[in-house]
Image (cartoon, rainbow, N blue to C red):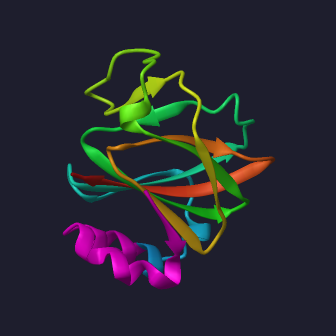
């Protein structure tokens, strides 16, 4: 997992060939003007979903993980916290992995919580269990899905 300021996003482009395109899009577009929905940037390899959610309590947030995609998440408005637990510590599957949706949910309790504010981003790799949407009130966020 990586948490940093968008000003430092260039430091992470070497981690994956598609990170440069994701961060370029993020830094060159006004995401606050985008309506909720999905934008395909590279078919099957890089998508952007803009969403508006209502913050949840840590207990209500679902711990999830992905196998085929890396998440780059940023907050457009509001403040969002994420629970975190390394995937090797996730032992209690709520349901089997859904390959079509590339998601598995766990009932384990996260061991840490991070907070993401506008101007910051977080990267969740397949080895990162994460419980998104923790917060109060409305949160507008963007999630890039990057094919591993």
Near-viewer residue (116 or 85): 85
Near-viewer residue (96 or 46): 96
What secondary structure is the stretch in magenta mostly built from? helix
Quarter residue 75 falls in? bottom right
Q: Is residue 112 left or right of residue 85?
A: right
**Relative height, residue 52 to residue 97 (above, below):** below
* Residue 138 in the image, given as x and y percentages of width and height: 75, 50
Q: What is the residue that sits farthest to the top in this orientation?
A: 95
Residue at position x 42%, y 32% in the image: 89
Based on the picture, tell me whether residue 12 belongs to the magenta stretch: yes
Number of numbered markers: 0
Q: Is residue 1 left or right of residue 100?
A: right
* Residue 99 in the image, given as x and y percentages of width and height: 25, 27
Quarter residue 60 falls in? top right
Based on the picture, tell me whether residue 79 belongs to the magenta stretch: no
Q: Which residues are magenta?
A: 1-25
* Residue 97 in the image, given as x and y percentages of width and height: 32, 22
**Relative height, residue 69 to residue 23 (above, below):** above
**Relative height, residue 98 to residue 112 (above, below):** above
Near-viewer residue (56 or 24): 56
Near-viewer residue (46 or 17): 17
Q: Is residue 45 left or right of residue 6?
A: left
**Relative height, residue 120 to residue 146 (above, below):** below
Residue at position x 22%, y 66% in the image: 16
* Residue 27 in the image, given as x and y percentages of width and height: 46, 80
Residue at position x 60%, y 46% in the image: 112
State which quarter of the image contains the N terminus: bottom left
Residue at position x 72%, y 42% in the image: 54
């Amino acid at each position: 997992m990586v948490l940093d300021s968008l000003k430092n996003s260039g430091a992470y482009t070497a981690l994956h060939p598609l990170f440069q395109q994701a961060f370029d899009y993020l830094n060159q577009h006004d995401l606050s003007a985008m309506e909720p929905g999905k934008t395909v940037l590279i078919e099957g390899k890089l998508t952007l979903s803009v969403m508006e959610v209502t913050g949840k309590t840590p207990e209500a947030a679902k711990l999830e993980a992905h196998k085929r995609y890396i998440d780059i998440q940023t907050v457009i408005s509001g403040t969002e916290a994420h629970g975190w637990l390394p995937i090797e510590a996730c032992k209690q599957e709520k349901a089997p992995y859904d390959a079509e949706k590339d998601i598995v949910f766990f009932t384990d309790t996260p061991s840490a919580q991070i907070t993401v504010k506008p101007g910051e981003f977080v990267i969740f790799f397949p080895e990162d269990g994460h419980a998104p949407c923790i917060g109060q009130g409305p949160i507008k966020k963007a999630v890039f899905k990057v094919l591993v």
